[in-house]
Amino acid sequence: MIMSHYNYWIVVVLMMIGFYIVIAHGNLIKKIVGLTIFQTSVFIFYISMAKVDGGTAPILADGIEQYSNPLPHVLILTAIVVGIATTALALALTVRIKEAYGSIEEEEIQQQDNLN
Amino acid sequence: MGTALAIVWMKDLLSVIMLSGIYGLLSASFFVAMDAVDVAFTEAAVGAGISTLLMLVAITMTGHKEHHSRHKPFLALAVVMVTGGLLIYGTFDMPSYGSSMAPIHMQVAPRYLNDSMQEIGVPNIVTSVLASYRAFDTFGEVVVIFTAGIGVLALLSVVFHPKEIAKIHLFNDSMHEKELILRIVSKILIPFILLFALYVQFHGDYGPGGGFQAGVIFAAAIILYAMVFGLSTARRVINKSFIKFLASSGVLLYGSVGVVSFFSDKNFLDYNILSADPIAGQHLGILLIELGVGITVASIMVIIFFSFAGRREFSKNQDNKTGGSKAS
């Protein structure tokens, strides 16, 4: 029971590390890195569900009976590339925030907003 | 996991980003261990390559020191602990790792595994699902990537006066003359990276690979070139409007392959009619749309990198004008 669920626990721990970075840190770049970790933990979650004991990569070949589930692979493959595109968008926004406010610390940005 | 933990403690964003690159590479090796070779491929190129690069370019503009945060982390820690505890409690209802009886393996997956060879004729099932069974989804993903690229362009694109461009060129060229070893090594490497990207692109039916991976690897080669030889040199090789044209033509190619099947009263993206033989039609369809995906992904990644780097030149230039008072 304990050994058969360790993959989920690794995912949960990684996800919580990412979550913690997102909510506890004020630096926007650091938040984006935290989101990336969170994202990757979801990827690992999907891929670990696709794994079948004794299975192999889902590329058909003679003499192999058991394959891992290909569907999560497809979903995550595209999700990774979409993830980098959206991360790039987030970084672009951060760069513009830096130009407008002179800071990427959440608190300093809020202070400036309150002054206006 | 240790790497992820270290990211929490690091205050210097440069080391945070380097660690996140290592983290990307490690998760790629996880994916190999769990039989997802296609995914590992993508993660290695994206997580350890391009995302690290983009973040590095971003911190050159935003500064790389994290300020000490003033609010207390205990509340956040408590929230995280409670959420994590609940999630772990939830995992007890999940099927155990590697079980072949898990519900996920009972639904549509056996059909893909058993019938894909007869219906699609492609040994790599990830490719056949991605490009044929679920091609409509993939089209959506490509459009998302395209839109994100447009978003980055809208946020970061800058227009220079011709006079300033000449100045920037001079500055760039002088900066990149020093690293002789890097230049020679990358000159040798880049053709092989490009060749490998093409192999991954066109061999995706039979082995791990496909448009997404190939696009990212191709873009990585061009970005490497731009980093070592300077942005101006890279711009001279790859025209800005040409690459924008490429990005949109990739999406267009994908979409038009789908529309072709309308003319013979079939569904969107039904490749069987592309050729007299359904299997050959499937092959052709997959080849074409993977090509569309590859072109779009590669050019969008290059566009994103160019806009970041171009923005950096712009802000540097502004700094020089104001006597470097804003330099951080």
Image (tube, coloured by chain):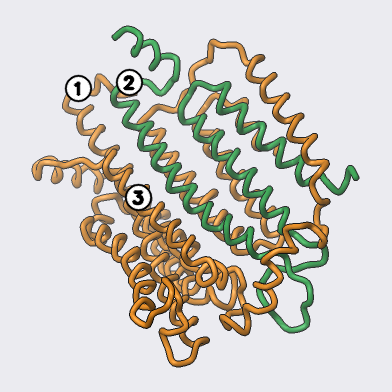
Mark 3 to mark 2 CA distance (whole Å): 28 Å
Q: Chain of mark 2?
A: A
Above or below residue B46? Residue B70 is above
Q: Chain of mark 1?
A: B
Q: Which chain is orange?
A: B
Left or right: where does residue B49 sit relative to residue B100? left
Q: Which is more foreground, mark 2 or mark 1?
A: 2
Q: Residues within 10 Å of mark 2 (few under 14, many from 20)?
A: some
**Residue B33 visible in the shown view:** no
Instruction: Say which residue appears at 59% left-offset and 39% top-offset.
Output: A37
Residue B182, given in percent of the width and then of the height, sits at: 42, 54
**Residue annotated with mark 2:** A102
Tell me the element at label 3: helix
Q: Which residue is mark 1?
A: B323
Q: Residue furthest top?
A: A115
In three-dimensional space, the C-alpha distance between marks 3 and 1, rounded to whole angstroms, equals: 37 Å
- Confirm or deny contact between disc 3 and disc 2 (CB under 8 A): no
The kind of residue on which mark 3 rests is Thr
Question: Which part of the image, by quadrant, shows the N terminus of chain B?
Answer: top right
What secondary structure is marked by label 2?
A: loop
Image mark for residue B147: 3
Front one among A116 and B193: A116
Percent from the top left, x then y, of residue B260?
35, 77
Local SS, label 1: loop
Instruction: Mark 3 vs mark 2: tell me if same chain.
Output: no
* Quadrant housing the C terminus of chain B: top left
